[in-house]
Amino acid sequence: MSAQRWRDPVRVPDVACARAARARQARLTKPPGSLGRLEEVVCRLAALQASERPRVDAVRIVVFAADHGVAAQGVSAFPQAVTAEMVRNFARGGAAINVLARSLGASLEVVNLGTVHETGRLPGVIDRPIGSGTADLAREPAMAEAQLLEALAAGGEAAERAGRAEVDLLIGGDMGIGNTTAASAVASALLSVPPRYLAGPGTGLDAAGVRRKAAVIEHALALHGSALAEPLEVLRRLGGFEIAALVGLYLRGAQLGIPLLVDGFIATTAALVAVRVNASAREWFIYAHRSAEPGHRMVLETLQAEPLLSLGMRLGEASGAAVAVPLLRLACALHEEMATFEEAGVSAGPEPQP
Ligand SMILES: Cc1cc2ncn([C@H]3O[C@H](COP(=O)(O)O)[C@@H](O)[C@H]3O)c2cc1C
Ligand SMILES: O=C(O)c1cccnc1
């Protein structure tokens, strides 16, 4: 598999800008550290944007949609037709992510990688067909090698469009009935954790449904067996087009030096694959929220990631990441606009001890 380009070096964050941003934070009229994670995240953004005064004005959200053969195993509370129906809903502007993108003034791209049910050409939807959904991962590899490479490339292209648009922040999202099964299978293989610890309700399975889902994944892991030794092979056999596109978005985004805000369980599993393929990509990821899907906690732990929010959301579509954007904007506004002790004539505390 010719996947070398995904291992090419990522941009190196600018530590001098992070240091300058930290020094400015220490001079602002507040006890040092009192803005907690807001200080930390603005200093990280400073390094990623190579600017002492980072901004989150231009935000691009890309939602990748695709179907999953494993849906045939009855692993979702919703029928497979919903994937294509939701793509139509995205085109009409009625989905959660449409509302969030409009409220944020963020640009939204929807990329349809292949659904079982036809959508026809839709305004504002980029058709990038790779197949009419993946094969059933419980019976055979979800993707052929060429399909995996195409799905990665589709994500890379979206990152390149975002780079040309000079966005300050890039967010990826997913739509695909059955994709919590695919993501749980990928995470289970990469973490070497039995699927019963990772599988969750997704769109709303009951306890018996979750047990069935874990058994389907268990069966898949046994079927693919020792072939699951390498991260891109895990992705090819157990993933999905939209999950692979997210991996491509993250890796190309990191290579281009675009800060990436990671959404919930599906997106974080893609981020884990990206980090296993190219370890330094991790520097470019900011984790937005902790999804209610139980597998998310373990994937976050493995990545040593502490997300900004925990709202019990479990939607996907990049929705949790979109909800975290106002926090990043507020962190930047505080950093930019607060007076320093010197400007305000406020007495600074003792110099920090070395
Ligand atoms: C109406 C609707 C809108 C959605 N938007 C995102 N998802 C999310 O739920 C699905 C994953 O859950 P599972 O693995 O249980 O199928 C994916 O489509 C994901 O994007 C949705 C699901 C539904 C039903
Ligand atoms: O956290 C997620 O990404 C998620 C959870 C449930 C359903 N779809 C996505």
Image (spheres, rainbow, N blue to C red):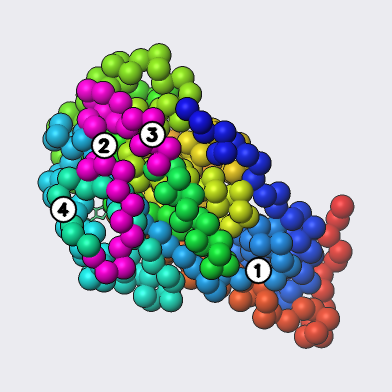
Q: What is the x, y in percent for residue 26?
A: 77, 67
Report the span colored magenta: 122-150
Q: What is the x, y in percent for residue 174?
A: 34, 51
The reply to whether discs 1 and 3 touch (Cβ–Cβ < 8 Å) is: no
* Residue denoted by label 2: 134
Q: What is the x, y in percent for residue 191?
A: 45, 27
Residue 119's quadrant in the figure?
bottom left
| Label 3 environment density (alpha carbons within 10 Å; few <14, some 14–19, many ≥20) | few
The reply to whether discs 2 and 3 touch (Cβ–Cβ < 8 Å) is: no
Residue 142 counted in the magenta span: yes
Name which residue type carries label 1: Pro
| Label 4 environment density (alpha carbons within 10 Å; few <14, some 14–19, many ≥20) | few
Q: Please, what secondary structure does the residue beneath circle 1 have?
A: loop
Name which residue type carries label 2: Thr
Name which residue type carries label 4: Glu
The residue depicted at 47 percent of the width and 27 percent of the height is: 1
* Pointer 3 residue Cβ closer than 8 Å to ligand 1: no
Image mark for residue 54: 1
The mark lying in front, picked from 4 and 1, is 4
The span from disc 4 to disc 2 (Cα, nearest Å) is: 15 Å
Question: Which mark is first along the chain, 2 or 4?
Answer: 4
The mark lying in front, picked from 1 and 2, is 2
Name which residue type carries label 3: Ala
The residue depicted at 86 percent of the width and 55 percent of the height is: 353
* Pointer 4 residue Cβ closer than 8 Å to ligand 1: no
* Residue denoted by label 3: 146
Image mark for residue 118: 4
